Amino acid sequence: MGVRINESQDLTAALRTREAILPGVMTLVLVATFTYLSPGLSLIVTFVPAIILAYVCYLLTSFQQMPEPGRVLPIYLVAFGVQFLHFAEEFTTGFYTRWPVEVFNAAPFELSTFVQINMISYAAFALGAIAIYRGIKGPMLIVWFFTLMGVIGNGILHPLYPVLATGEFGYFPGLYTSVIYLVLGPLLFSRLWEVRRDSGSGHEHDAEISNKSGSNQ
């Protein structure tokens, strides 16, 4: 498991390490890839902001202190399993055509492209599970992207898609399975983010010990 970056360390130097640079490069690559593959604005206004925010969250949390696997991995794996059910619902109800066409007035996804994007993503998400278990920092970028876009994003956006498409609430491909993420999303986010609270508590504890030591001298 990675060592926590504390206040005595040079943050600028830390940001020059490969654990910061490689995920940053991957973020830029994914921004370019999503922009290139996007039918209209579909991926540009969803996936692109999500991967940038994922990198920011990574720098604020996992980059400084890796989470406890036992706290994060079970929820992550449940969410990952639900994602397969979500893909099945989207695939069988035509999400790949209706989403770009009806929500963004763009061309539909090619079916092969839609499947390839999802399968490559799932392979990356599986590697994210290994990163959590083994305490490897860099791939936590993907864990954060899955959390923000795949879980929280799907949970929030899918109920809104019919409104954006037709102006009315109703069913839109992927809606039923996305509702599960309204529960899993906050749980997974809080488990990943709690290292920030732990870090703050650690600093307060260190300060308290330092003050007591000074008083005893």
Image: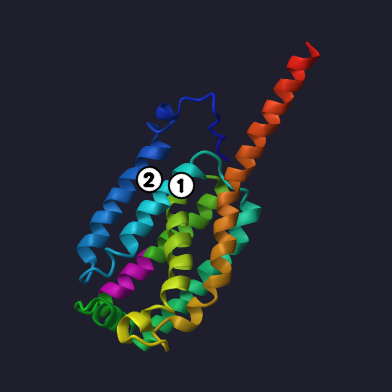
* Residue 40 left/right relative to 169: left
- Give the residue number, with chain letter if any, for mark 2: 23
10 Å neighbourhood of mark 2: few (<14), some, or many (≥20)?
A: many
Amino acid at pointer 1: Tyr
Magenta highlight on residue 5:
no
Whether residues under marks 2 and 1 lie with C-beta atoms below 8 angstroms apart, the answer is yes
Residue 161 in the image, given as x and y percentages of width and height: 37, 79
The label shown at residue 30 is none
Distance in Å between CA atoms under marks 2 and 1: 9 Å
Coordinates of residue 8 in the picture (x, y in percent): 54, 24
Q: Nearer the viewer, residue 150 or 205?
A: 205
Q: Magenta span: helix, strand or loop, mainly?
A: helix
**Residue identifier under label 1:** 58
In the picture, measured across the screen, residue 43 lies left or right of residue 119, that is: left
Q: Nearer the viewer, residue 59 or 204?
A: 204
Determine the secondary structure under disc 1. Answer: helix
The residues colored magenta run 113-120
Quadrant where the image shows the N terminus: top right
Determine the image quadrant of residue 35: bottom left
Q: Is residue 18 above or below residue 129?
A: above
- Residue 198 appearing in the image: yes
Residue at image point 70% right, 32% down = 205
Image quadrant containing the C terminus: top right
Give the residue drawn at x 31%, y 70%: 116
**Left or right of residue 214, residue 71 in this image:** left
Tell me which residue sits at (28%, 49%) in the image. Answer: 28
Q: Secondary structure at mark 2?
A: helix
**Looking at the rendering, which quadrant does residue 186 occupy?**
bottom right
Say which quarter of the image contains residue 89. bottom left
